[in-house]
Image (cartoon, rainbow, N blue to C red):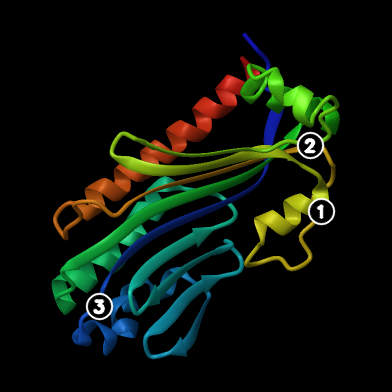
Amino acid sequence: MTRNPFSLALQRVVGQIRFRPTLSYLNNIPLSVKDLEADFEEWRAKGNNDLTLYSPEKKEFLQISAGAITYVNEDNYDSEKLKSYIKSAFDKATQSYSVSKVKRIGVRNIQILKSSFEFQDLVDLIYKKFYLQSEQLKTISSAETRDVVFVLDGIKNDFSNHIQLGPVKKTEAVKFFDSSFDPNLEVENDNNLLIDVDVFTSENLNVENSLVKFDKAIEENLRIVKEYIDYLIS
């Protein structure tokens, strides 16, 4: 069995449903998440139509704005909690305030993984796995590869996806992660791997199927992350 040289250092998961708000919804955004208030230590409001339930302790927040429900977690990612918060807020919007037009659903998973490789070894690994088949690249500009990133936009299993994967040093990792909770965030080493996977769709969405598709987007995101890591260590 191949030993996994990667271990999780940081993770930021974002789940979101976008929709066309009704006037009734705009006037009642605070009431739409009143039942969830006890799960969070704080709340913040930019106005009547932009409210965030905020937990510095658990590093998570649920934002309810004019046209979107967004959940963010930067600590202990729990897909069931993500589903539960999004479902609760979305059900209230649709059942109590007549929201009926869904525009987009998406799940984004950003991971910074510590590795047992040196930085240059990570560069060589990514290059070998994703670019080595094109020997002409070396003759054009990369006789010596100093850094590399793999970016791909695709469609699979009825979802669009955007993938970004590559080695990052500690200052790059902190900047890319862009924590909402820790302005003094630090990463110990320079030999980290970034994996950023965004899975989303705007196609054929309605009130009846959006939560089912949202759950499938979570599963698809986790599948893609796992299979890229498996590919790197194979």
Callout 1, which amino acid?
Thr
3D distance between C-alphas at marks 2 and 3? 44 Å
Q: Report the residue at 79% width, 36% height from top.
A: 147
Tag 3, which secondary structure?
loop
Q: Earlier in the sequence, mark 2 or mark 1?
A: 2
Q: Report the residue at 24% width, 51% height from top.
A: 203
State left or right for residue 95 relative to residue 112.
left
Q: Quadrant of residue 125?
A: top right
Residue 80 visible somewhere in the drawing: yes
Residue picked out by circle 1: 171
Q: Earlier in the sequence, mark 3 or mark 1?
A: 3
Image location of residue 190, percent across then percent down: 84, 41
Residue picked out by circle 3: 21
Residue picked out by circle 2: 147
Image location of residue 157, percent across then percent down: 30, 34
3D distance between C-alphas at marks 2 and 1? 15 Å
3D distance between C-alphas at marks 3 and 1? 39 Å
Image location of residue 8, percent across then percent down: 66, 39
Q: Report the residue at 17% width, 78% height from top.
A: 97
Circle 1 residues within 10 Å: few <14, some 14–19, many ≥20 = some
Callout 3, which amino acid?
Pro
Circle 2 residues within 10 Å: few <14, some 14–19, many ≥20 = some
Task: From this view, report whether residue 201 is shown above or below residue 94.
Answer: above
Single out the residue that lies furthest toward the front. 140
Q: Quadrant of the N terminus?
A: top right
Q: Nearer the viewer, mark 2 or mark 1?
A: 2
Single out the residue that lies furthest toward the top. 1
